[in-house]
Image: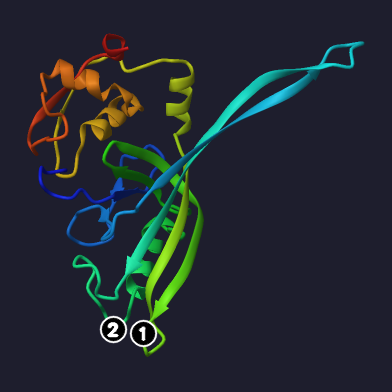
Amino acid sequence: MAQEGKLQKLMIRAYSDPTFDSELFLADDGKPYEVAINPETYSLSFKSEYAIENASGSSKGGVKFHRSLPENLTLEFLFDRTGVFADSPAQDNGVIDDLNDFKKITYEFNGDIHSPNYLKVLWGDLLFPGVVTEFNIEYKLFNPGGKPIRAIVKVTFKNFIAEAQRAAREKKSSPDLTHVRVVKEGDSLPLMTHRIYGDPKYYLEVARVNGLTNFRKLTPGQKITFPPIEKVG
């Protein structure tokens, strides 16, 4: 949960199921993975497929839309144990442990679910559910013992929506019941809205319905009402 006056860190939530219901935690503290150093930028890429159609007896073809492909999110993460950053002090083992933890939760095969984890990337207004398709490490600096003390990890996430949610979105069907949810630590209004409707874009309307003047500041234990989707179209 973002707090006024406190730097909001990029957070990654890991799940064992494609519907993002069963959350996994790297540590025993029951908290999502949080980066020590925020990225400087991120990029979103979108791609559509078109089919070329040739009319009978004509040499000219028409272009017909086929489908929109899942969007990609690309981030560059800095891991630094040189001692320059207060939130990431120097360690004898450099960035090796940090990289292992990060790779375990984002990219490595999870034997319990027979695939890597399903992930949600959260940072400010960014909420991106997906899976990692590319994971590249560039080692930059080394200590006298040869341990890397700085590395840049470039990660590409592909948007992922479970088939049931995708079908509901394509048919423009929506929840038709009012839902009441209790805010938990780390929740944001876009995240909670995504859980209910399968899309975070309705969060401003949910804020209006609940009379929230500062939707960025939610309090654990607070109850939020999510009305039928028809009412927030």
Q: Which residue is mark 1?
A: 143
Query: What is the x, y in percent for residue 31?
Result: 20, 53
Query: What is the x, y in percent for residue 226?
Result: 21, 20
Which three-letter amino acid code belongs to the residue tagged 1?
Asn
Left or right, 221 with reference to 131: left
Instruction: Identify whether 84 is placed above or below 117.
Output: below
Decide: few, some or many residues near mark 1? Use Cα within 10 Å; few <14, some 14-19, many ≥20.
some
Instruction: Identify whether 66 is placed above or below 15.
Output: above
Choose between 111 and 87: the one closer to the eye.
Answer: 87
Query: What is the x, y in percent for residue 218?
Result: 12, 35
- Taking the spot 60% from the left edge, 25% from the top edge, the residue there is 67
Instruction: Name which of mark 2 and mark 1 comes first in the sequence.
Output: 2
Q: Residue furthest right?
A: 57
- Taking the spot 32% from the left edge, 69% from the top edge, the residue there is 80
Choose between 223 and 18: the one closer to the eye.
Answer: 223
- Taking the spot 32% from the left edge, 38% from the top edge, the residue there is 126
Dividing the picture into quarters, in which one does residue 52 lie?
top right
Quadrant location of the N terminus in the rendered image: top left
Instruction: Give residue 154's mark.
Output: none
Secondary structure at numbered mark 1: loop
Secondary structure at numbered mark 2: loop
Left or right, 132 with reference to 202: right
Question: Label 2 vs label 1: CA separation?
Answer: 8 Å
Discs 2/1, front: 1
Instruction: Identify whether 166 is placed above or below 107.
Output: above
Left or right, 58 with reference to 168: right
Which three-letter amino acid code belongs to the residue tagged 2?
Asp
Labelled pair 2, 1 in contact (Cβ < 8 Å): yes
Query: What is the x, y in percent for residue 87?
Result: 20, 65
Q: Which residue is mark 2?
A: 92
